[in-house]
Amino acid sequence: MRRIGRLALFAAVVSTGAPIVVFAVGLALAPQPTDFMCFWAGSDLLARGADPYDPGTWAAAVDGLFPNWLGLLRRPPCPGGYAYPLTTAVATLPLGVLPVRLAALVWMVLLLGGMAVGIVLIARGFGLGQRGGLLLAAITLGSQPAWLTALTSQYGGLDLLALGILTLRGAAVRPALSAGALTVLLLKPHI
């Protein structure tokens, strides 16, 4: 690892992370054809007192063609029904009371921030140092799960934050912190 300079590692982090941010912002500005619409619609319906599991209510909430970030018309990827447990709708309820575009921007900030903080916490938790942390960031941001987080608006960034919390020294003796991290991992588990 000594042969790889900090500047080269930093450049690798920027070159893998910058496109993720660009895609995330683009998708947040056109959230309807993304998985976020599925999360948001469930919490929006719940906030309005409607049943996200009612087929007619669900179809009305997500039916339509919407422009994606490239301007191409797409349907939301969740036409069949609300496919998540009720806990997902309850956990995302604060987003459901916001307009979909504002909620999507908040969601992307949470995902990208969670990804960044998660990488830092994992690097610290394993004592990787600055070079090791930069290498971890470059590898993580260049990975398929990181790209899918931005491209599909999935929970990956929050999952990485939860994993980072679990690597903290002493997290095992802080039951509330560990329980919170595990709860995030259980809301939308990814293998």
Image (spheres, rainbow, N blue to C red):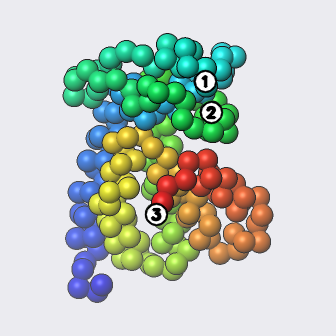
Residue positioned 43% across, 47% down in the render: 112
Q: Nearer the viewer, mark 3 or mark 2?
A: 2
Q: Secondary structure at mark 3?
A: helix
**x then y, percent, for residue 83:** 54, 35
N-term mark: 3 or 1 = 1
Q: Is residue 84 visible?
A: yes
Residue type at numbered disc 1: Pro
Indicate the quadrant where residue 46 lies: top right
| 94 vs 166: above or below | above
Residue placed under numbered mark 1 in the picture: 52
Q: Are marks 2 and 1 in contact (CB under 8 Å)?
A: yes
Residue sitting at the far bottom: 2
Q: Which residue is mark 3?
A: 119
Give residue 89's mark. 2
How far is disc 3 from disc 1 in space, using C-alphas?
Answer: 34 Å
* First reached walking from the N terminus: tag 2 or tag 1: 1
Q: Is 102 on the left-hand or right-hand side of 75?
A: right
Residue 181, position as x, y percentages in the image? 64, 57
Q: Nearer the viewer, mark 3 or mark 1?
A: 1
Residue 90 location, quadrant: top right
Q: Residue at x 62, y 33 (%)?
A: 89
- Apparent side of residue 169 relative to residue 174 in the rendered image (left or right): left
155 vs 52, left or right, is left
Alpha-carbon span between mark 2 and mark 1: 9 Å
Total labels: the figure holds 3
Name the secondary structure under disc 2: helix
- 71 is higher (above) or lower (below) than 34: above
